[in-house]
Amino acid sequence: QVQLQESGPGLVKPSQTLSLTCTVSGGSISSGGYYWSWIRQHPGKGLEWIGYIYYSGSTYYNPSLKSRVTISVDTSKNQFSLKLSSVTAADTAVYYCASTPSSVGWFDPWGQGTLVTVSS
Amino acid sequence: VIWMTQSPSLLSASTGDRVTISCRMSQGISSYLAWYQQKPGKAPELLIYAASTLQSGVPSRFSGSGSGTDFTLTISCLQSEDFATYYCQQYYSSPYTFGQGTKLEIK
């Protein structure tokens, strides 16, 4: 049973870069067949898909965030990461990592989520 | 971008009731739709994918139907643990999008 766990700073200053890591356990990112996503949820609001990466490094980003997002993978650590640049208060959200069984699919399982607050 | 209209946004019901949540797409998506349940402070959990396929371990009182632009999630006999927020999600085309959610509360 694959499990995911997000980690990273809970507080980021405006204009800086938000950086989060998702550690995958119970399975190997390198085994293929799964894409690895980041999804966020603004406080009390709905869900927004940020983008995903394949173990090979292929990525796809939500066009609404594409100019500020970088998702990378470290197969040696069984981790993938999110960087979101030039953050503002509007980027305050709970950030989740999740897997999807193909490049077009649903999300399961999810990490527990981590709240990132953008504030000076 | 495919827009989704989920209704109602708030649903009040009692244990034992049968409830239905609707999700309407701005364009046809065949059966590329998933449903999730989210409880306060927790991550969403997958209930249904491919519009009507129950995820392993999900109780059979949950069911999904529909194709094209109109989809429904039905809970046949509400249990106390079902009071939560429900989201639909389309994966027909990127960017993948979610409905705005339906909060199911105890009447």
Image (cartoon, coloured by chain):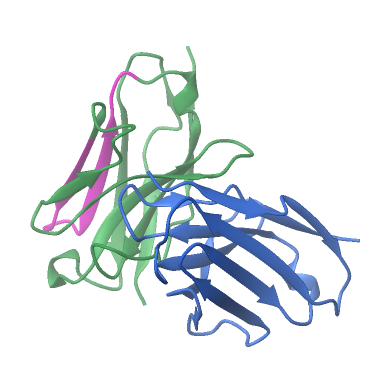
Chain colours: A green, B blue
Task: State the image coordinates of residue A36 (x, y, percent, origin top left).
Answer: 27, 57
Q: Nearer the viewer, residue A87 or A104?
A: A104
Q: To which quarter of the image does residue A76 belong?
A: bottom left
The residue depicted at 63 percent of the width and 88 percent of the height is: B60
User: Does the magenta stretch mainly form a helix, a strand or a loop?
Assistant: strand
Does B104 sit left or right of B88 as displayed?
A: right
Does B70 sit left or right of A71 as displayed?
A: right
Task: State the image coordinates of residue B76 (x, y, percent, origin top left).
Answer: 74, 82
Q: In the image as oriented, which residue stretches furthest toward the left?
A: A56
- On-image quarter of the C terminus of chain B: bottom right
Q: Is residue B29 visible?
A: yes
Q: Is residue A79 above or below residue B78?
A: above
Q: In the image as oriented, which residue stretches furthest toward the bottom?
A: B60
Q: How many marks?
A: 0
Q: To which quarter of the image does residue B87 belong?
A: bottom right
Q: Is residue B72 magenta?
A: no
The residue depicted at 71 percent of the width and 50 percent of the height is: B9
Q: Nearer the viewer, residue B45 or B101?
A: B101
Task: State the image coordinates of residue B56 (x, y, percent, origin top left).
Answer: 48, 84
- On-image quarter of the N terminus of chain B: top left
- Residue stretch in magenta: A70-86
Task: State the image coordinates of residue A61 (x, y, percent, origin top left).
Answer: 25, 42
Does A85 sit left or right of A74 as displayed?
A: right
Q: Is residue A118 visible?
A: no
Q: Is residue A14 above or below residue B106?
A: above
The residue depicted at 58 percent of the width and 50 percent of the height is: B5
